[in-house]
Image (cartoon, rainbow, N blue to C red):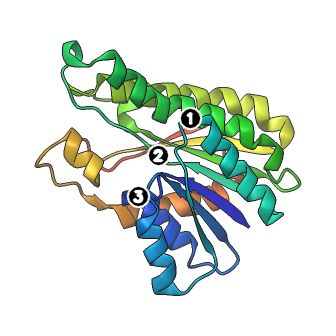
Amino acid sequence: MLVLVTGASKGIGLEIVKQLANNPGILVIGVSRNITTMSTLVKQRNTDNILPVKADITKAADQKKIVATIKKLGLKLDVLIHNAGELVNKPFPKISEKELRSVYSTNVFAPFLLTQILLPVFNTKNRAHIVNISSVGGVQGSSKFPGLSAYSSSKAALCGLTECLAEELKDKNIAVNCLALGAVQTEMLARAFPGYKAPLKAGEMAEYICNFALTGQNYFNGKIVSVSSTTP
């Protein structure tokens, strides 16, 4: 089984890579602009089922590099986890166009365009699974917080994209679901809510994500699943 995880250098993404790689039947491609932590992990474990790929998912050339890597392996992609995310914590009037575009580039445009270019390499003989990692802050009707207008609205767009892709890709035997995460103790949470202590660690949330990514396609398609035990 081949699984691709974006934003895999730290936090939840790195924990997803670690946990999936515990299964000898899974090859995990971890994508990040910085692969130092993954490369160290490969050396520490002396494993061949983690493949770090240095790439910026917002750049077309690097998206093609990811596809080329999969084709070179001669494998088909079973699971794609869009975990990479960017956050700006600023009052609405102070968010610049550059910052807004940067957040949407990572959180919306990259999952959209990377999924497009990866379509030919999905394993459609079995039921492939795309998992978009959103935020409970991007779910309609959820609590919203000052300073997170760019982030939360981009995650809302990712939720909407999930529902659209589930319909468009179902005939290709690809399921698309979204996990809207609540508070998890990560660097990103610290930027959003300085000083807040989350009830879950990255490894604990990663365990849930891994299980969902490997089995959720058998039960869900086009669903936005809120995974939150508390609201900051």
Horizontal side of residue 160 vs 63, given as left or right: left
Residue 80, compared with residue 90, is above or below; it is below
Q: Secondary structure at mark 1?
A: helix
At x 32% / y 36%, what residue is drawn? 87
Image x and y of residue 134, in percent: 46, 39
Q: Would residue 7 be seen by someone viewing this image from the given angle?
A: yes
Give the residue type that dot 2 points to.
Ala
Residue 120, compared with residue 200, is above or below; it is above
Q: Which residue is mark 3?
A: 12
Horizontal side of residue 88 vs 169, given as left or right: left
CA gap, disc 3 and disc 2: 9 Å
Packing grade of label 1 (10 A; few <14, some 14-19, many >=20) is many
Q: Could you tell me if the residues under marks 3 and 1 are in contact, i.e. CB atoms within 8 Å?
A: no
Image x and y of residue 143, in percent: 28, 29
CA gap, disc 3 and disc 1: 18 Å
Residue 136, compared with residue 83, is above or below; it is above
Q: Which residue is mark 1?
A: 110
Return the residue found at the far left.
195
Q: Which residue is mark 2?
A: 84
Closest to the observer, 38 or 146: 38
At x 52% / y 66%, what residue is drawn? 17
Give the residue type that dot 3 points to.
Ile
Closest to the observer, 84 or 54: 54
Image x and y of residue 125, in percent: 89, 54
Q: Could you tell me if the residues under marks 2 and 1 are in contact, i.e. CB atoms within 8 Å?
A: yes
At x 79% / y 50%, what residue is drawn? 122
Which quarter of the rendered picture does the N terminus lie within? bottom right
